[in-house]
Amino acid sequence: MTAPSLASYVTKRPWLSKLLKPVAGWYSNAALYRQMGLKADDLISEENADVLKALGRLTPKESYDRIYRIRRATQLSLQQKILPKNEWTKPEEDVQYLSPILEAIEAEAKEKQALDTLVPSKAGH
Amino acid sequence: MICRSALSRGSKLALGRQGARGFAAAASPKASYEPTTIAGVKVASRDDNGPTTRLAVVAKAGTRYEPLPGLTVGLEEFAYKNTNKRSALRITREAELLGGQLTAYHTREALVLQASFLREDLPYFTELLAEVVSQTRYTTHEFHEEVKDIIHQKQAKVDASAVALDAAHAVAFHSGLGAPLYPTPSTPIDSYLNEQAVADFAAAAYSKSNIAVVSDGASEHGLQKWIEPFFKTVSAQGSGSLNNVASKYHGGEQRISAVGQNSVVIAFPGASLGASSPETAVLAGLLGGESTIKWSPGFSLLSQAAAPGAQAKATNYAYSDAGLLAIQINGQSAAVKKTAEAAVKALKGVAESGVSQEVLVKAIAKAKFTLLSGSEVGGVGIVHAGANLIHGGSPLKVAETLKAFESVTGDKLKAAAKALLEGKASVASVGDLHVLPFAEDLGLQV
């Protein structure tokens, strides 16, 4: 499930986006997942039907890489280590590979809900 | 109570009508589709002012034109899936709300997207069909989650008679028309069929030069008004190429073992769509097969030839540049063998001694009815009208064809049957090959 987000509100206002960007960058680094070689979308909880469906729609390559990153991070966590600095996830590599698919699936579900509960009315009423 | 005089009067009337009645008059002028061109789109329309309309896009995308195996069925299953404008779910629900029906099916030559709906909903469904043709997204997840499953399910339903008919086409025409109508589970299509290949095929096939819009029951004015704005998004010339090979008749024999079902197809060169060979249609009517009246096997040669436990029927499969007159026999292996022998014997009988006048009259009447009811109800008329247009011909002239049927004589029929038997046949047997006969044993040349 995607978390509630103010992202669209912020990106629509350039001044706000400019103001918050360094803060966001700092936060992402401070969250330490990049130091474990993960991407932000790797942190989305899998225990959810929509997310499982979205994972099924990844390309084989994306899916393989994701499992690799997660296994590496698990191992690091076990060993109480972080990766050497040159293997950290670079900010430009930290792209959303899962969220767009997840959003599409949620939009489908929302549309289905809307269509299931719609009440037809005669034209002109 | 039916008195004797009434009966004889009725039959006299029926017989009298055969010769006297002007069928050109009986077939209303609306029976044929009228070809026009609206904003670069070929349109065939017919309007009988009924309350419902059938609108179809007939595309040159049948199995004969697919560049790689399986693309036609892929494209067919992608019909009414997500488009750039709306989701597959929305398309389904909206069509339901309007009481419409959406179908997609294919023949060897054409892929048909057909909508049936209430007359006043013409704008909505015109927009929908244009959108499906030009803006379907062919997404990867739909291919894996839906399209593939449905194709596998339909493949599992391909039965012996379909396999035999495909095999007969394959030996008759090799590539092109010889491509299977539906790939069987053992046809290797997985390496060819994917959403990208389907999208490329769609880009080649769904262009104004390769589609025809056929409407049955929509007003001329409505079509003029709505086709132009909605079909603007369809490209004028397709990108990529279709598998365009002229058909050539080869003939031959094919035997495939299968468990459970038995089918034999005996096929000869038939009449193509545009060809004026009324003998073939009348011969198909004469061979017939399926009884059309109750409590009687009927007059047709095949229904009399059929042994208990087997069904036989003759059909002329007409394509744009070739035709195949096929006798299909299905049932238990021993009965199929007997029926096949009897069917060839019956055909030889026609070639040697012709047919009686009475049987000829019945065969002509049957051929007429098949033509008229086929073009009136069901999709046959729509598919034929569209197929003729996309191949550069004009829709079937019903009245003229009926007249041509009238002119068939016993001698012409005899000559036609003789020509068939002298040429090479295409024979396909599927099932218990220990029992099913070879073409040579049937007395056919292959």
Image (tube, rainbow, N blue to C red):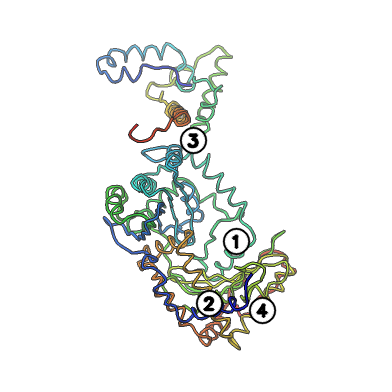
Label ID, residue B162: 1
Marks 2 and 1, the one that precedes in the sequence: 2
Q: Chain of mark 3?
A: A
Label ID, residue B440: 4
Say which amino acid is labelled 2.
Ala
Q: Residue at x 46, y 41 (%)?
A: B96
Say which amino acid is labelled 4.
Glu
Same chain for mark 3 and mark 2? The answer is no
Say which amino acid is labelled 3.
Thr
The answer to whether A62 is drawn above or below residue A90 in the figure is below
| Distance from Cα at disc 3 to Cα at disc 2 | 69 Å
Q: Is residue B303 left or right of residue B101?
A: right
| Distance from Cα at disc 3 to Cα at disc 1 | 36 Å
Viewer-nearest of discs 3 and 4: 4
Q: Residue at x 58, y 71 (%)?
A: B314
Assess whether mark 1 and mark 2 are in contact (beta carbons under 8 angstroms): no
Viewer-nearest of discs 3 and 2: 2
| Distance from Cα at disc 2 to Cα at disc 1 | 38 Å
Q: Is residue B125 left or right of residue B6?
A: left
The answer to whether A31 is drawn above or below residue B227 in the figure is above
Quadrant containing the C terminus of chain B is bottom right
Same chain for mark 3 and mark 1? The answer is no
Q: Quadrant of residue B47?
A: bottom left
| Distance from Cα at disc 1 to Cα at disc 4 | 23 Å
Q: Residues within 10 Å of mark 3 (few under 14, many from 20)?
A: few
